[in-house]
Image: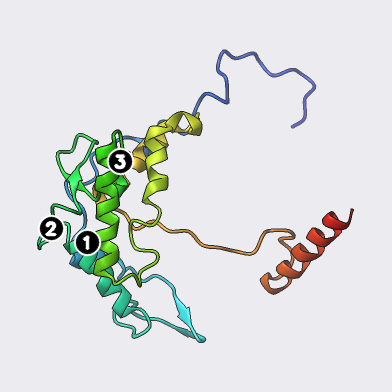
Amino acid sequence: MTTTESAPETALDPTKVNPAADCEANRTKNFASRPMTGDEYIESLRDDREIWLHGERVEDVTTHPAFRNPIRMTARLYDSMHTGEHVDKVTTPTDTGNGGVTMPFFKAPTSSDDLLKERDAIATWARMTYGWMGRSPDYKASFLGTLHANKELYSPFQDNAERWYKESQEKVLYWNHAIINPPVDRQLPPDEVGDVFMKVEKETDAG
């Protein structure tokens, strides 16, 4: 329906209000009292996720020879926060109020001592993996700190940012990101998008 009537005035500023604030996903809750263990991490991957390799679907990523070794190495990192010689180096009290511990790099630092603790924790994990796990669970953890320390930047979704900071810190969630071709033209197949992007860049530089 089309109308020429003006919209009613409202006192709410849409740039300052999160319209999904009352959604279940955005409600603050105590997600966990401790980080995952290695067994819990492995079990979390057995969720019927769809992964294809060389034209064949991987039935169980935790046992497939292409993935099982890094998965078990990651499980050791999670276990190191619960038992063993590195517990004190790779854990610190959370700041979420749950009374648990987290990997130091998942907590927004507030002092030079915090920064040193983070440095020692990620160095410990790097040594445990012999430097071969370039994207271990702490890879995106420094970004997660901004969800709390700079939550105003995410307005009007700062409550949701705080919620993700809390859950990620308490569970030590394994965040990552994927690098994809730039969406220059969504009608093109992926193998042609890169060529179009390069052409646009060249024309821009030439112009």
Inspect this view and state whether residue 132 appears: yes
Q: Which residue is drawn at 35% across and 78% down?
A: 67
Circle 1 residues within 10 Å: few <14, some 14–19, many ≥20: many
Q: Nearer the viewer, residue 168 or 204?
A: 204
Inspect this view and state whether residue 25 appears: no
Q: Mark 2 points at which residue?
A: 82
Tell me, for residue 90, which label it has, or none: none
Q: Mark 1 points at which residue?
A: 78
- Which label sits in the foreground, 2 or 3? 2
Q: Which amino acid does label 3 sit on?
A: Lys
Q: Which of 63 and 11 is in front in this view?
A: 63
- What is the quadrant of residue 185 in the picture? bottom right
Q: Which of 65 and 139 is in front in this view?
A: 139
Q: Mark 2 or 3 closer to N-term?
A: 2
Horizontally, residue 95 falls left or right of residue 148, namely left
Q: Which amino acid does label 1 sit on?
A: Tyr
In percent of width and height, residue 206 lies at 88, 57
> What residue occupies the far right of the structure in this picture?
207
Q: Which element is circle 2 on? A: loop
Q: Mark 3 or 1 closer to N-term?
A: 1
Q: Mark 3 points at which residue?
A: 166
Distance from the alpha carbon under mark 3 to that under mark 1:
18 Å
In percent of width and height, residue 164 lies at 36, 43
The answer to whether the residues at label 1 and label 2 have Cβ atoms under 8 Å apart is yes
Q: What residue type is labelled 2?
A: His
Q: Is the N terminus in the top left, top right, bottom left or bottom right quadrant? A: top right
In the image, residue 48 sits, relative to residue 55, either above or below, namely: above
Q: Residue at x 51, y 62 (%)?
A: 178
In percent of width and height, residue 80 lies at 17, 61
Colour setup of the view: rainbow
Horizontally, residue 93 falls left or right of residue 114, namely left
Distance from the alpha carbon under mark 2 to that under mark 3:
19 Å
